[in-house]
C-alpha cells in the first residue's frame, strides 16, 4: 500500500468516524475508500468492519455524558447486540450476499423517513403494568437484534436504523439516542470484527490508517451532536439516509 493510499484511508476514516458517530453512516465513507485502493468487495467489507472497531471506541468515549444513567439498560442490551453481531458475521461468511442486500434499501429508506418525521408530544398516561413493560422490552430487544445482525453482516447505515428505533420507541433526546446507538453498534461490530480477524481475508495494512482516522472522527462526532440544534441535525441525518437508500437501490436493482 502506497503513502497516498494510506493518506486517503486516513481522511476517509476521519469522515467515516464523524458520520458514523453522528448518524451511523461510517461505511458510506470508509467502504468505498477500500474499494478505491483495489480491494475486492468481501475483503473490503471485512477490513472495514475491523477498522470500525476504532470508531466504536471513539464514539463511546465521546458519548460518556449522555450514557450517564443508562447503565442498567446498556447492560441488558449488550448481550443482544453481541449475539446479533455474531449472527451477522456468520451470515457474511456462510451465505450469498445478494438476497440480504436487496432488502437493505427499503429498510434504510423506512428508517430515514422515521427519523425525519417529527415526534408527537408524549401524552401523560398511566404507568404500564408489568406485562406491558415486558412486551415493550422484548419487542425492543428483538428489533435491536435484527439491526445488529445487519450491522455484523455489512453495517452501512445500521446506525440510521438504530437511531430511528431509539427515537420512535422512547423519549430520548437525539444526543441520548445517538449515545445508545454508539454503544450497541460498537458491541455488534467488535464481535463481528473478532470473527473476521480469525477467519476472513482482512487486509491489515489498511486497518491502521483507516482505524486512526475513525478514532479521530468518532471522538468529535458526539460533541457535535451534543451542541448542534437537534431538528436540523435530525433532518440532515434523515436526508443522508434517504440519499444512501436511493444509491443502494440503484446499485442493487
Image (spheres, helix red, strand yellow):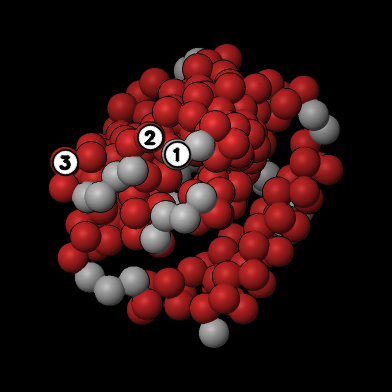
Which comes sooner in the sequence, label 3 or label 2? 3
Q: Which residue is mark 1?
A: 1
Whether the residues at callouts 2 and 1 have beta carbons within 8 Å, the answer is yes
User: Residue at left 56%, top 49%?
Assistant: 33
Q: Position of residue 57 (x, y in %)?
A: 44, 24
Distance of label 3 from label 2 (alpha carbons): 16 Å
Kindly state the secondary structure of the residue where label 1 is placed. loop
Farthest residue to the bottom: give it: 253
Residue 69 location in percent, x, y?
A: 48, 18
Residue placed at 64% from the left, 70% from the top? 247
The answer to whether residue 64 shows anywhere in this view is yes
Secondary structure under the numbered disc 3 in the rendered image: helix
In whole angstroms, how far apart are the C-alphas of marks 2 and 1? 7 Å
For label 3, the residue is 198
Which-is-in-front pick, marks 2 and 1? 1
- Could you say which is closer to the camera, residue 66 or residue 137? 66
Which mark lies nearer to you, 3 or 2? Answer: 2
Which disc, if any, is residue 205? 2
217 lies above or below 121: above
Decide which of tag 2 and tag 1 comes sooner along the chain.
Answer: 1
Amino acid at each position: 500500500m502506497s503513502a497516498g493510499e494510506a493518506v486517503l484511508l486516513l481522511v476517509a476514516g476521519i469522515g467515516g468516524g464523524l458520520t458514523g458517530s453522528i448518524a451511523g453512516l461510517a461505511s458510506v465513507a470508509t467502504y468505498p475508500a477500500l474499494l478505491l485502493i483495489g480491494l475486492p468487495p468481501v475483503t473490503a467489507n471485512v477490513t472495514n468492519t475491523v477498522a470500525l472497531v476504532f470508531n466504536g471506541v471513539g464514539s463511546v468515549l465521546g458519548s460518556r455524558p449522555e450514557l450517564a444513567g443508562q447503565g442498567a439498560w446498556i447492560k441488558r442490551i449488550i448481550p443482544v447486540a453481541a449475539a446479533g453481531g455474531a449472527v451477522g458475521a456468520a451470515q457474511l461468511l456462510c451465505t450469498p450476499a445478494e438476497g440480504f442486500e436487496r432488502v437493505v434499501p427499503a429498510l434504510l429508506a423506512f428508517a430515514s423517513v422515521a427519523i425525519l418525521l417529527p415526534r408527537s408530544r408524549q401524552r401523560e398516561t398511566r404507568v404500564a403494568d408489568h406485562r406491558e413493560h415486558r412486551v415493550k422490552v422484548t419487542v425492543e430487544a428483538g428489533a435491536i437484534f435484527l439491526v445488529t445482525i445487519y450491522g455484523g453482516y455489512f453495517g452501512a447505515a445500521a446506525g440510521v436504523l438504530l437511531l430511528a428505533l431509539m427515537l420512535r420507541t422512547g423519549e430520548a433526546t437525539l444526543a441520548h439516542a445517538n449515545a445508545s446507538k454508539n454503544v450497541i453498534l460498537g458491541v455488534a461490530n467488535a464481535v463481528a470484527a473478532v470473527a473476521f480477524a480469525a477467519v476472513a481475508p482482512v487486509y491489515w495494512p489498511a486497518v491502521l490508517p483507516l482505524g486512526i482516522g475513525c478514532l479521530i472522527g468518532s471522538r468529535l462526532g458526539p460533541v457535535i451532536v451534543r451542541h448542534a440544534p437537534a431538528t436540523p441535525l435530525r433532518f440532515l441525518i434523515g436526508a443522508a439516509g434517504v440519499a444512501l437508500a436511493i444509491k443502494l437501490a440503484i446499485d442493487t436493482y
